[in-house]
Image (cartoon, rainbow, N blue to C red):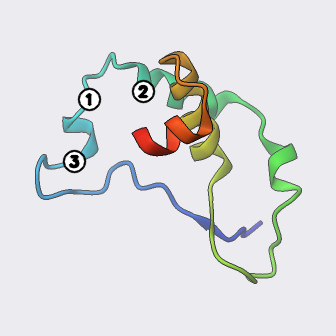
Amino acid sequence: MAYNFVAPERDQLYLLPASLTDWLPEDHLAWFVLDCVDEVDLSAFYADYCEDGWGGAAHHPKTMVALLVYAYCLGVRSSRQIERAW
C-alpha cells in the first residue's frame, strides 16, 4: 500500500558530520529503540491514513512511535517538552 508519509532518512548525508551514524555510537539507546520499533506491529496505525494522496504528508508512524519511546526512556513525557527538545 502506498501511504502519504514523510519518509525518514536516517542515512541522509549532512555537511557535518558526514551522516547520522557518525553522531551516535553503535550502542546508543536510539539505535536500540529503532530496532525495537521495527519489530512492533503498527498495522492499527495505518488504518487511519488515506491512500488517496489528499492532504499533506504525515510523518511515518514508526518514526513517531520511536520518538515517543525514546523520549519516555529519557524521562520526557510532556508532548510540549518533546516538541521543544527535538
35 vs 61, left or right, is left
Residue matched to label 2? 31
Amino acid of disc 3: Ser
Q: Is mark 1 on a helix, strand or loop?
A: loop
Q: In which quarter of the image is the N terminus?
A: bottom right
Residue positioned 72% across, 70% down in the render: 2
Amino acid of disc 1: Leu
Q: Are marks 3 and 1 in contact (CB under 8 Å)?
A: no
The mark found on residue 24 in the picture is 1
Q: Is mark 2 on a helix, strand or loop?
A: helix
Residue positioned 68% across, 71% down in the render: 4
The mark found on residue 62 in the picture is none
Amino acid of disc 2: Trp
Q: What element carries label 3?
A: loop
Q: Do the residues labelled 2 and 3 touch (CB within 8 Å)?
A: no
How packed is label 1: few (under 14 Cα within 10 Å), some, or many (20 or more)?
few
2 or 3: tag closer to the N-terminus: 3
Out of 67 and 33, give the one closest to the viewer.
Answer: 67
